[in-house]
Image (tube, helix red, strand yellow):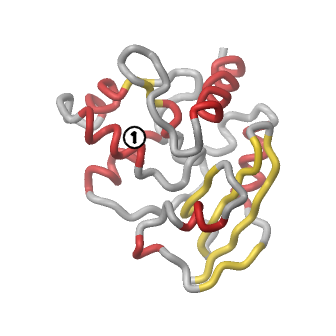
Amino acid sequence: MNAIIQTIETPDGALTILADDRQRVLSSGWTDDVEAILGRLHPALLPDDVAEGRMDAADAALAYYDGDLTAIDTVAVHQRGTAMQNAGWAALRMIAPGRPLTYTEFAVRLGSPRAVRAAASICAKNAPALFVPCHRVLRSDGTLGGFAWGLPVKRSLLDREAALAA
């Protein structure tokens, strides 16, 4: 498989997006380090070749940052995981901007109310950050919890969404 990579500047810093030849986002994150982006991928999705290029997902990310919080909703993504991970990643895409869930609430949405650690693991293994908005899940006490790209980025995304969704 061949892949396209593009880095754009955002208010939260460099956002690098990796997509396959069908424009499906495989991985993304707030870094300009290609190896960090590739390191988030399931081994079966590692591309044979990566070339710089333009992609629709970058335009959607820029529109998101310009205030269109729904711009990322229709961007195609491609991940490989267990049935529960795949269900979780699909459920993450259904969390409305400005309406974050706790890990417990997320586990309930997955039909496994006691699987809070599994819900957190689904977020931790999410490669196409922003497009599968795992930043919209918080600890039960309302604190941020973890985020692969740093808590300042997670806080910024949540604050932006809360302000624009109000």
The percent position of residue 50, horizontal first and vertical second, equals 66, 79
**Residue occupying the point 65% across, 37% down:** 70
Quarter of the image where the C terminus is located: top right
For residue 139, which quarter of the picture?
top left
**Vertical arrangement, residue 20 with respect to residue 141, above or below:** below
Residue drawn 67% across the image and 28% down it: 156
Residue 81 lies in quadrant: bottom left
* x, y percent for residue 72: 64, 45
Residue ID at (71%, 51%): 15
- Horizontal side of 67 relative to 80 (left or right) equals right
Q: Which residue is mark 1?
A: 91
Kindly state the secondary structure of the residue where label 1 is placed.
helix
Which three-letter amino acid code belongs to the residue tagged 1?
A: Ala
Q: Position of residue 144 (x, y in %)?
A: 49, 25
Q: Is residue 51 above or below residue 63?
A: below
Is residue 134 depicted above or below 96 in this figure?
below
Question: Residue 131's x, y, as percent?
Answer: 58, 48
Q: Nearer the viewer, residue 50 or 63?
A: 50
Residue 153 appears left or right of 8: left
* Left or right: 106 in relation to 108: right
For the point 66% across and 59% down, which residue is it? 17
Quarter of the image with the N terminus is bottom right
How many numbered marks appear?
1
